[in-house]
Amino acid sequence: MASICLIFLAMFVVSMESAVCQSTVSIQSFVGISGSQLVLDGSPFLFTGFNSYWMMYLSSDANDRQKVSAALREASAAGLTVCRTWAFADGGDRALQISPGTYDEHVFQGLDFIISEAKKYGIRLILSFVNNYKDYGGRPQYAQWAKNAGAQINGDGDFYTNQIIKAYYKNHIKTVMTRLNTITRVAYKDEPTIMAWELINEPRCETDPSGKTVNGWVEEMASFVKSIDSKHLLGTGMEGFYGDSVPERKQANPNSIQVGTDFISNHLVKDIDFASIHAYPDVWLTGKSEDEQFRFLLSWLLNHWQDARHVLKKPLILGEFGKSSKGAVYTLDKRDTYIGNVYRDVYRYARSGGTLSGSLVWQVMAPGMESYYDGYEIVLSQSPSTTAVMSRQARALGALAGNGTHGPVRTGHRRHRHGTPP
């Protein structure tokens, strides 16, 4: 076993060196849409990717930037092509936005570095504007800022309706998108390395389970984004919970719960370009067996793929999924099998028309980040078997995209939409 690992590591080093050699090929084109497919340069764009939420926090410290570089370098060597990360840190330690409209230039330069490094290694980025949770500020911080300014705030749910909070949020969107990268000298809104923006990570609204409040907010904010940036794709960042627009679909939610979003109506908003779902049956269905949890995940994927293709007529991405090592019966082999089985269905649905365009595992980290471990961490250079599973999927989707069919291309702006879903 030790010899096998050494052989893999040697091959991985060679692969990383190859990735470095190829890094001179810069990203030039924007990812667009044809019908219900993602496309790039006229061909289907199918991807295998990863989440690394921590990147801006570490890249704001020059001593930690090598970890960002290492993660991107190892991901590129493994064939991964998309990374999802945060473009927010609201208040608190190493804040990007110290207070409403006040930014730490040093932290912003950390985000500049991430974009520059991603471009170097041929990895596209999905950048989220804010968090639903208190981590890195999120909705609670915006509510507190408005309360400090004298607004009558009843809770975090006011994030979606309070005019002061919405003005703060819009200003953040504008500040990020119009940012001139100090390294590449390209404004974020003109940078093709950025694949897409996300309005919010995992939106929920405790004051209105139906999804209607969030729907109004998505309509307003998506229109605002497109008024500034018509080149990039825009997603919601949602987990995929169904709401009141299709009552029978609510039964597909874990334990039939509602969290204030509506997968159908929220993604039918005209300025939203693709749909997203997350999948954590181990968190949502605690007390259920692993087999029951996995059967739910497969059903979750199937339902959303069907709705994306036939109802929304938009691409779908699996924005987060993973296997936690904190489970009672966890083994590395179980993780590899789990990820491989998810990939199997992603490939199957991608092959059936391309609507399911890719997946992003939670989460990839660099060597030396033990203090950040959450149970889902994958260090590619230290996880040869898992890396092999991910690389196989990347190659399979790459080959599938090369043999795919496609129609006319549109960019992120609704006025450019052409073609029909397959």
Image (cartoon, grey):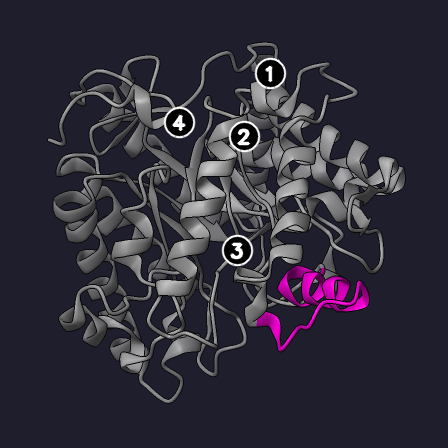
Mark 2 or 1, nearer chain start? 1
Tell me which amino acid carries mark 2: Ser
Tell me which amino acid carries mark 1: Ser
Picture disc at residue 412: 4
Tell me the crowding category of disc 1: few under 14, some 14 to 19, or many 20 or more residues within 10 angstroms, Cα based.
some
Mark 3 or 2, nearer chain start? 2
In the image, the segment drawn in magenta is 137-156
Q: Answer whether labels 1 and 3 touch (C-beta < 8 Å).
A: no
Instruction: Give the left or right position of residue 186, taking residue 223 as reference.
Output: right
Q: Position of residue 225 (x, y in %)?
A: 51, 35
Helix, strand or loop at mark 3: loop
Q: Answer whether labels 3 and 2 touch (C-beta < 8 Å).
A: no
Identify the image quadrant of residue 369: bottom right
**Which residue is the site of mark 2?**
76
Q: Nearer the viewer, residue 125 or 243?
A: 243
Q: Nearer the viewer, residue 47 or 272?
A: 272
> In which quadrant of the rendered image does the C terminus lie?
top left
Q: Which-is-in-front pick, marks 1 and 3?
A: 3
**Which residue is the site of mark 3?**
201
Separation of residues labelled 2 and 1 (CA atoms): 9 Å
Q: Answer whether labels 2 and 1 touch (C-beta < 8 Å).
A: yes
Q: Which-is-in-front pick, marks 3 and 2?
A: 3
Q: Position of residue 263 (x, y in %)?
A: 30, 58
Mark 3 or 4, nearer chain start? 3
**Which residue is the site of mark 1?**
23
Q: Which-is-in-front pick, marks 4 and 1?
A: 4
Helix, strand or loop at mark 2: helix
Q: Residue at x 40, y 70 (%)?
A: 260
